Amino acid sequence: MDDEYWGAPLVGFGDTKAEVVVIGLAPAAHGGNRTGRMFTGDGSANFLMRALHASGFASQPTSEHRNDCLKLKGAFITAVVRCAPPQNRPAAIELLNCSCYLDRELALLSQARVILALGHVAFRGYLGHIKRCGTIIRHLDFKHGKIYSLPHGLPVLVASYHPSRQNTQTGRLTPAMMDHIMATVKKILAESPL
């Protein structure tokens, strides 16, 4: 109650030369929407950051506030929606309205070799981006841990459950599962050097 909320759209953050782009759903109502940085200031932020730190992509295992000295190395974090949606369920019009921002960020991240989609909405959002860029991909099913090698030099797509509390507190997504996803990302990068 004592916090001053950012309460405005958010942009992605991280290494602009990233080989890994992490795409989430939207700023959390009391996380990014409060702090002004994606995946910052809540349980899902710290769950994700612990895994990114353990795999060498983050300078520290927590993401508390915008001035906490967190740096991403080789990774960039963004989302398909830029404002906190009601009940964490963005409407189709909101997804459409925010799609141009995702498209612009991904166009600037030209060194990306892996897209890590956190959750079904992010997965579908990335596939929508590909389609808007002119590449038609046959229907792909979202499944945690699934790896998709895409055509036309597109980055490899890795699907993961979103590290929301409803997934992490119920055991649907455990730290070991997230670590396995990050090990998969590292393996993809190691097996296909530039």
Image (cartoon, rainbow, N blue to C red):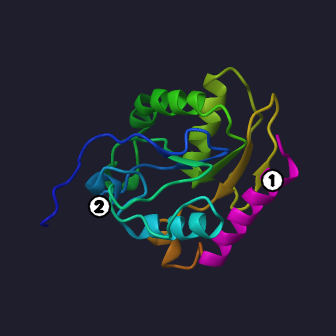
Of residue 111 and residue 88, the one placed in the foreground of this image is 111
Residue holding disc 2: 30
Amino acid on which disc 1 is placed: Ile
The local crowd at label 2, few if under 14, some if 14 to 19, many if 20 or more residues have their Cα within 10 Å, is some
Say which quarter of the image contains residue 3. bottom left
Amino acid on which disc 2 is placed: His
Residue at image coords 12%, 66%: 2
Residue 64, image x, y percentages: 36, 65
Question: In what quadrant of the picture does the C terminus appear?
Answer: top right
Residue at image coords 40%, 59%: 69
Of residue 146 and residue 52, the one placed in the foreground of this image is 52
Q: Which of marks 2 and 1 precedes in the sequence?
A: 2
Residue 157, image x, y percentages: 72, 46
Residue 191 is covered by the magenta coloring: yes
From the viewer's perspective, tell me whether residue 81 is left or right of residue 41: right
The local crowd at label 1, few if under 14, some if 14 to 19, many if 20 or more residues have their Cα within 10 Å, is some
**Can you see residue 91?**
yes
Circle 1/circle 2 CB separation < 8 Å: no
Say which quarter of the image contains residue 32. bottom left
From the viewer's perspective, tell me whether residue 134 is left or right of residue 30: right
Question: Main SS of the magenta segment?
Answer: helix
Residue holding disc 1: 188
Span colored in magenta? 175-194
Q: What kind of element bears circle 2?
A: loop
Q: CA distance from mark 1 to mark 2?
A: 33 Å
From the viewer's perspective, tell me whether residue 58 is left or right of residue 192: left
Which of the numbered marks, if any, corresponds to residue 114? Answer: none
Residue at image coords 68%, 61%: 144
Residue 128, image x, y percentages: 60, 33
Of residue 140 and residue 17, the one placed in the foreground of this image is 17
Task: Work out whether 29 lies above or below 175.
Answer: above
Task: Work out whether 191 lies above or below 3.
Answer: above
